[in-house]
Image (cartoon, grey):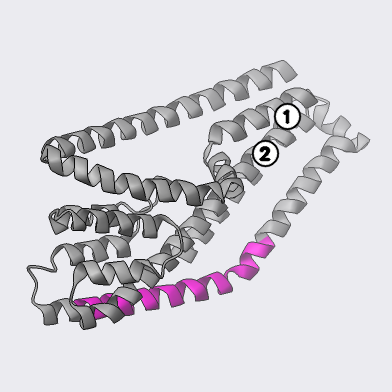
Amino acid sequence: MTLYWIVTMLFALGVYLFSRQALEIASDLVSGLVGYLRRQFQPRAMRRLIAFQEQGVAQSDAKEQKSLSPGLILYGLSQLRVAWIALGVLAALIFADALLSPVALTVILVGGELYCAQVRSQHLRRLDEDAANLIVQFSSRYPISRSLIRTLTDSVSTLPGGAVRRATEKCLARLNMNQETNLAVQPLRDAGAEHSLSHVVLARFAGLLADVQDTNQEVFLDTLRLLQEEVESRMELHQQSRQSLTLVRSTTRVLQVVVVAAALAASLLPNWRFYFVENMKNWMLFVSMLGVAALGSFYVEAELRQLEAG
């Protein structure tokens, strides 16, 4: 019986992993093809100059990332669902027990997904804060200098290292090479793509910068002021939502710990253990309860993230 459910779970995990990897590969191929076609329409000399400028930015980013290697390693592991799945299956095989094996597999898979979601949430929160800081700094400096490059240069100096700063520095490198503004601000539109995130405010800010030359200055300043007010309101709402959801999130964590404790008790206490391993029907009941608990955790976490982001 133990071998049967292990094989079944391995097959289901294999199908899930294969389908997910196939979608990611297809997405990478499409984005790579689009980038290749875009580069082919750029003049060769311009491509070399921009690549040279962005290489310097990449080298400075590499130096910064070396000092943050533990955090980068944890983040990289959090994004590798293969690692969590392999760890869960390995734990199940090590226990080789009708009750402890499904408990270990469920706890590791759910814990890995929750940790991955938490890390992504922290990166998105950092992206929100840096984007708000960039827009506020730009809005306060541009009316004085009226220069896009100078204002971006002064604004980026106030940002901490991160996706927004790297994207802004790439924009400056392209603008200094006299590239078209619409193409130069593309890194700002793509900021967060390295973490599979999208940022509506940064995209709107990049679109506003792209039209700065064709827009009346008064209209541009009014639009910039409205965007700044929207960003400040967005950050305030996010802060309030996080504070209001703290109790709900803490309660969810307590319930998850209680479920894990109950599953371990059912696996270790003799009477409960005998009941669940007595026949296939009772064992399937135990596995079904673990599945319901896992799906409930995923659902609650998804709802909390949606409420927090909204």
Over which residues does the magenta segment extend? Answer: 222-251
Looking at the image, which is closer to me, 141 or 307? 141
Where residue 155 appears, as percent x and y from the top left, is 33, 71
Q: In this view, does 63 lie above or below 242?
A: above
Q: Distance between the residues labelled 2 and 1?
A: 9 Å
Where residue 91 appears, as percent x and y from the top left, is 73, 29
Looking at the image, which is closer to me, 277 or 86? 86
First in sequence, mark 2 or 1: give its number.
Answer: 1
Q: Dividing the image into 4 quarters, which one contains the N terminus?
A: top right
Residue at horizontal 35%, vertical 74%?
231
Residue 144 relative to residue 300: left or right: left
Q: In this view, does 36 lie above or below 180?
A: above
* Residue 193 can be seen, yes or no: no
* Residue 249 can be seen, yes or no: yes
SS label for mark 2: helix
Q: Is residue 262 above or below residue 86?
A: below
Looking at the image, which is closer to me, 84 or 104? 84
Estimate how packed mark 1 is, as few (under 14), some (14 to 19) or many (20 or more) residues with alpha carbons within 10 Å: some
Residue at horizontal 67%, vertical 32%?
88
Label at residue 108: 2
Where residue 106 appears, as percent x and y from the top left, is 67, 37
Q: Dividing the image into 4 quarters, which one contains the C terminus?
A: bottom left
Q: Do the residues labelled 2 and 1 touch (CB within 8 Å)?
A: yes
Estimate how packed mark 2 is, as few (under 14), some (14 to 19) or many (20 or more) residues with alpha carbons within 10 Å: many
Q: Name the residue under label 1.
A: 91
Q: What residue type is labelled 1?
A: Ala
Magenta stretch secondary structure, dominant: helix
Q: Does the magenta stretch include residue 227?
A: yes
SS label for mark 1: helix
Where residue 51 appears, as percent x and y from the top left, is 25, 42
Looking at the image, which is closer to me, 122 or 57? 57
Q: Is residue 151 magenta?
A: no
